[in-house]
Amino acid sequence: MGPLLSVSELKKRYEVKKSLFSRDREIIRAVDSVSFDLKYGSTMGIVGESGSGKSTLARCILFLEKPDSGRVFFKDEDLMDVKKNELRSLRRDMQIIFQDPYSSLNPRKKVYETLSEPLLFHRIVGRDSVRERVIEILMDVGLNEDFIEKYPHEMSGGQRQRVAIGRALTTNPSLIVADEPVSSLDVSIQAQIVNLFLDIKEKTGISMLFVSHDLNIVRFISDDIMVMYKGMVVETGSKQEVFYNPLHPYTQMLIDSIKGDFFKKEVDYNTDISQGCPYFPRCSIRNDRCKKDTPVLIGDKDHKVLCFRYAN
Amino acid sequence: MHRVKIIKEFLKVKEITIKISGLHTEISTDSGTIKAVDDVGFHIEKGKVLGLIGESGSGKTMTAMSILRLVPPPGRITRGNIIFEGRDLLNLTKKEMESIRGNRIGMIFQEPMTALNPVIRIGEQIGETIAFHNNLSRSDIKQRVFELLRQVGFEDPEKRYIQYPHQLSGGQRQRVLIAIAISCNPSLLIADEPTTALDVATESQILYLLRQLISGQGMSMLFITHNLNIMRRFGDYVCIMYAGRILEVGSVEDFFSEPLHPYSRGLLDSIFAFKGDETRLKAIPGFVPKLSDLPEGCKFHPRCMYVMPICKKNEPEAKKIGEDRWVRCYLYQN
């Protein structure tokens, strides 16, 4: 059996004005030639700072945003070729959870409506057993029957996120894409939701793409980790490899930062990086070659890195 | 012998920059009075950083606003003392308070974009504060601004002086705000989540800069954050807030090696627990209570794994456990 999800050479660019009144346009490469496979039942953590393209990548994979080029195979079907109505039935099999459950839930719908709608729309259960199924889902996400009649504003952030997770589970998807699902929650609630994801994973064997800027959380939940910087994958591999044997200077910096080291070096944002390594302006081990040529991902299937230092 | 002892005692006397005691701030709403800050007290020594840590709605920002006397109505300070440089800030007139804000107490806020005026040049925004509090000539002010820009790590102050906020990155804007905050050599710096909007590397640089400024100028700092990880590397003292109350105070070494309050332990467990072999995070059950709907007794008891019958009825007092170490919990009352 092949992988559940296979992404190859995915690209997405945005053209933005350089300033409000300027005619000059600048091309932002939000996702730049990203390739990876996601095995059945495994979780891939995508890490990167704001603007690294991790959310755009997640949205492109679900075709919420149309990629400019590249291929996305989901269960061996090429999403680029799929027609719009076929995409709808595929969507049933791939669900997304957003960062802010307050804006992703309809404020005028009770929990019951939020959860029963996809069940009925995709004809997963009949009308007579909807209520039963809704209660089951609520139990699965650590809530209970009392929540059926509640509106989003009557719940706490953690409870709302549980409902959002429940809604994603209604269609029994094979893939869940979670885009910063715990970042907007309080620290003491984050751990609860992370545990909920782990419970669901164990129970259903679902595959997950877990997007986060928090390496600590990603480390706990993922089997594989992918580190993004300026739209490119700079390092990817198994959790063990990436975390305990980080190769790319950016990954090393991220790991140092959760261990508690400070950095003195000023980030030089103004350096032109239309060519060369995307990390060049901030890199501590750069040389002249990094400025001219763009490195490619090298390594084996357990661990790949985008850096000339490891090229022969 | 006796003399040596006296000298030792003398050396132990710490210079206290600010001392807050019994602070109460309430917000009156249609559905009753909310106690946003309830019996809060702590002090900060000269040259030290106190981290005020809490989740949303714990009252940490309201505490800072109370110190600055900027509590937005319908909130108001009802009781307490805030002794700063020998005076109780709560007894000062509006005019006197204005001469302290931005002058003796500097402020840094979370959002570096909204805190700066987008249509005024960087240099002028820094100069504005200096001109307000000092009687200096224009050229003196300009020189001081250059000096400040250099101090916060800009190598080309002349160029930065004439730039506008949108021409700077997030980290650079935060540096400008720091320059404004320290422009009048304050003895206390209040920073409310100053790095939350920044990425990891930039955050590190800003923290490094703040640390340098504190040790270099003997400033004290009240650092408000929800991030324990930052405090472990950056703070001297930690103060844990929950539902408007302080649950625990201690030095960073004491607190992180042996957190006392069950809530503190839960917080630390939920972020630092995993070493690789655990299958689940140790989460604190339940949810953060709303200030308008607080439980009886100890405010943490519905989520506490050590809850006793007394916790449900009465609220514990803050009890001194050791040197600079306080905890509000019945587990430590005897």
Image (cartoon, rainbow, N blue to C red):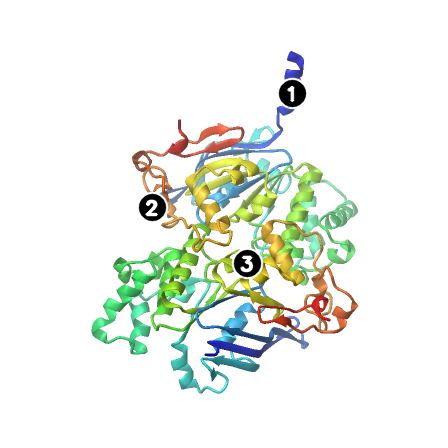
Say left or right for A106 vs B239.
Answer: left
| Residue annotated with mark 2 | B293
Separation of disc 1 and disc 3 at Cα? 46 Å
| Crowding at mark 2 (Cα within 10 Å: few <14, some 14-19, many 20+) | few
Question: Within the image, what quadrant is residue B10 found in?
Answer: top right
Judge whether A168 appears above or below B177 on screen.
Answer: below
Question: On what subunit does the disc labeled 3 rest?
Answer: A
Callouts 2 and 1 on one subunit: yes
Say left or right for B183 vs B238.
Answer: right
Q: Residue A94, how many percent across, how many down?
A: 42, 74
Nearer to the camera, B91 or A68: A68
Disc number for residue A178: none
Residue at the top extreme of this rendering? B2
Mark 2 lies on a secondary structure that is helix
Residue at screen point 77% across, 54% down? B155
| Crowding at mark 3 (Cα within 10 Å: few <14, some 14-19, many 20+) | many
Mark 3 lies on a secondary structure that is helix
Looking at the picture, which amino acid does disc 2 mark? Asp
Callouts 1 and 3 on one subunit: no
